[in-house]
Image (tube, grey):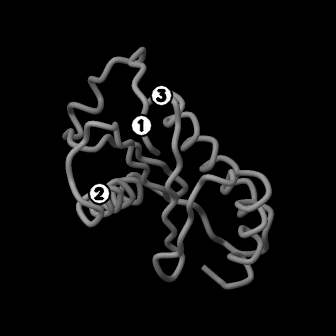
Amino acid sequence: MPKRALFRIGPIFSRQIMRREDLIGRIGGDEFALLVRVPTIIEGQAFARDIHARLSSVLADTSYPVTCSMGALLIPPDASGNAAELMHAADLAMYCAKRGGKNAIEISRAGESKGEVDRQRLGEQREGFA
């Protein structure tokens, strides 16, 4: 992704998406990590989809042919794993999104396989991170 496109995205994060308590970091190149607290898994899924939609919209308005492939990892409070393991799981979700096509999002849940994530109940109400 060209640096100019990255500069266009920065203000969107700081003014429209991120809250004071949220954390964002650039992993390298055009990869970023966000850590945000959400009240429920459902809200985490909605938050991830909203971020993806906003970024896709901003990128579509640039003169650069770039899209946003995003992996989101929902981390319930009782999830096990250290930061490296959780980052690896989020990375796997991103690569799954990339394999699914351009401008895609893959939302996974820490500690569960893809099949388990697909079967999770939509009404589950547990606090977690996205």
What is the CA distance from the residue labelled 1 to the residue labelled 2?
Answer: 13 Å
The residue located at (29%, 59%) in the rendering is: 92
Say which amino acid is labelled 3: Thr
- Could you say which is closer to the camera, residue 10 or residue 127? 127
The residue located at (28%, 56%) in the rendering is: 89
In the depicted structure, whether residue 31 falls above or below residue 74: below
Which residue is denoted by mark 2 in the rendering?
86
Which residue is denoted by mark 3 in the rendering?
40
Say which amino acid is labelled 1: Gly
Q: Are marks 3 and 1 in contact (CB under 8 Å)?
A: yes
**Does residue 43 appear to the left or right of 119 in the view shown?**
right
Give the numbered dot on residue 87. none
Q: Position of residue 37 (x, y in %)?
A: 51, 43
The residue located at (47%, 28%) in the rendering is: 40
- Could you say which is closer to the camera, residue 32 or residue 80? 80
Which residue is denoted by mark 1 in the rendering?
128
Say which amino acid is labelled 2: Leu
In the image, farthest residue toward the front: 21
User: Within 10 Å of the Cα at label 1, are there few (<14), some (14-19), or many (20+) other Cα atoms?
Assistant: many
Q: Position of residue 30 (x, y in %)?
A: 54, 76
What is the CA distance from the residue labelled 2 to the residue labelled 3?
Answer: 18 Å
**Does residue 28 appear to the left or right of 119 in the view shown?**
right
- Could you say which is closer to the camera, residue 36 or residue 27? 36
